[in-house]
Image (cartoon, helix red, strand yellow):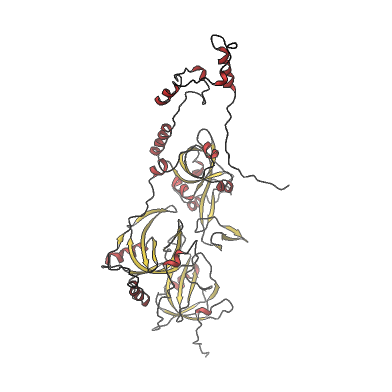
Amino acid sequence: MAMVSSVFHKISSICGRRQNWRLKAKLVRVWNMCAVATPHDPYAMQMVFVDEEGGKIEAIVQKQYMKKFAECLVEGEVYRITNFGVNANGGNFRAAGHDYKLSFTSCTKITLCPGASIPGLGLSLMKTSQIKKTKGHSAYLVDFMGIVTAVSEELNINREGRQTRLMLIDFVDEFGKIRCAVFGDLINVVMDFLALSGTGLPVVIIQFARVNVYKGEAGIQNVMNASKILWNPDLPEAVDFKNGLAVHEIETEVAISTITDRRRAPSMRDEFLKLYPKKSIGQLYDMLEEGYFIILGSVTEVVEDFKWWYMACSCMKAVCYVQGVPFCKDFQKNVYDMTPRYKVKLLVSDGNDNAHFILWDLDCYSLLNKTCRQMLDDIEGQPPGYFPEEILNLVGKEMLFRIESSQEDLLTFDDAFKIKKVCCDVDILAEYKEQVDDETPLKLKFAPAFTKLADCNATGEGLELSTCCKSIITELDITPPSCVASSSNVDESGSSGKKKIEEQEEAPLERKKRVRVRPVKLEKN
């Protein structure tokens, strides 16, 4: 009988150059990996192991093998692991800094080691100062420890077309404060801890958190199913941290406060009636100013030679394909968890001018009450380029649009403006129209620029003017200088002067426009 080797390899030595690896490691975390659109349908199972040397590595089980391992793996237990594959450690969110990860298959053997113990959780704690230096997306999940100084009330927000629970937590360590956003069911864990906690500020560790940069400021947030919160853990790291707080004169014997300074999103009425300038489509093209503007218009056409959906990475940006493999330019990685999202091009008119607007995923969902994935499922079997009736039915719909106007976007989207938000509330639309009418100081019964000025007298009769304007006009000589003729050319009825005014009336008025530079497509001969 062949003797089974008792030699185990270190996690730090794992690489892709051999296959007969043997590990003895503690399972510190296991979770199901799910797409955002299908939170109850996991496509893989992910684990993190740590060995006696403190080495940490990820392992993944694909969906077809999950049933074999799901019931035999328990967090905190030590296992012997053999017959596994080794692959490069990629992906958008990596729970370990190892260059490689394990891949469990039908041949993989995992055996429990009764009585074996490996101390610690394999923590890789980062300080506030380190997290604050993050300028963009980090592919690696982090561990953080601090005292909780404040929490917010539970909020419900619309996230990617779904109602999501949110709670904010302020952490403090010896280097400063950082804010953590907690989403979903992990809020239940926080609320249970808060209900049982006594006086004083608790020490909390959050494992496998994601670093998120929002409006230029770095913070952390949980990752669905992966992140774990430890409240006043009985760990040497937590004891040392709490003892060191007194050295930095951080007061802990106080109550947890409530976060009240969070800026709430403005109401729909404020957003479309108060916060942004109101413009016409013609004014959008005339001005050089960039920013956000409110436009009232009606959809006159859905552009059908423009694809109405795209495949997006978790960062919501479109993926491209490199040698047939989906690739995210933002993450600079191949991606396999993609979500279809709306991107509909509309022709919108305000009654005088028209322009192309791009309607994005969240606003499409609010208008159609159906996710892009659901829409694609509904039209399964239709030929390529088919447009769902729900989208075509947007034609004729009057809406308020919050538009982002920028030269770069006009060039990127082929002279189309990006829609940031839409409003179809009839009361807000009516109030908007009233405000626009009230903000127009001069209303003419006929064509602009005093085209019938000869039929009006010096008191302004024949024009609809405000009382203030009438008082000013009575003090003015409104006869155009070019219409003043010599006495030899004017009869008693003033016919010569009237004739010149009528000649001016026929001449078109020239309007100086500052137009944007529009993209030009060059084709090779």
Residue 500 versus residue 361 in the image, above or below: above
Q: Residue at x 61, y 60 (%)?
A: 324
- Viewer-nearest residue: 480 or 340: 480
What x and y, as percent, mark residue 133? 47, 64
Total residue callouts: 0
Residue 416 versus residue 57 in the image, above or below: above
Residue 226 can be seen in this image: no
The residue lying furthest to the right in this view is 525
What x and y, as percent, mark residue 360? 50, 48
What x and y, as percent, mark residue 364? 47, 47
Residue 164 versus residue 491 in the image, above or below: below
Q: Is residue 32 left or right of residue 247?
A: right
The residue lying furthest to the left in this view is 199
The residue lying furthest to the front in this view is 487
What x and y, as percent, mark residue 437? 42, 32
The residue lying furthest to the top in this view is 492
Q: Residue at x 50, y 17 (%)?
A: 455
- Viewer-nearest residue: 182 or 237: 237
Residue 462 can be seen in this image: yes
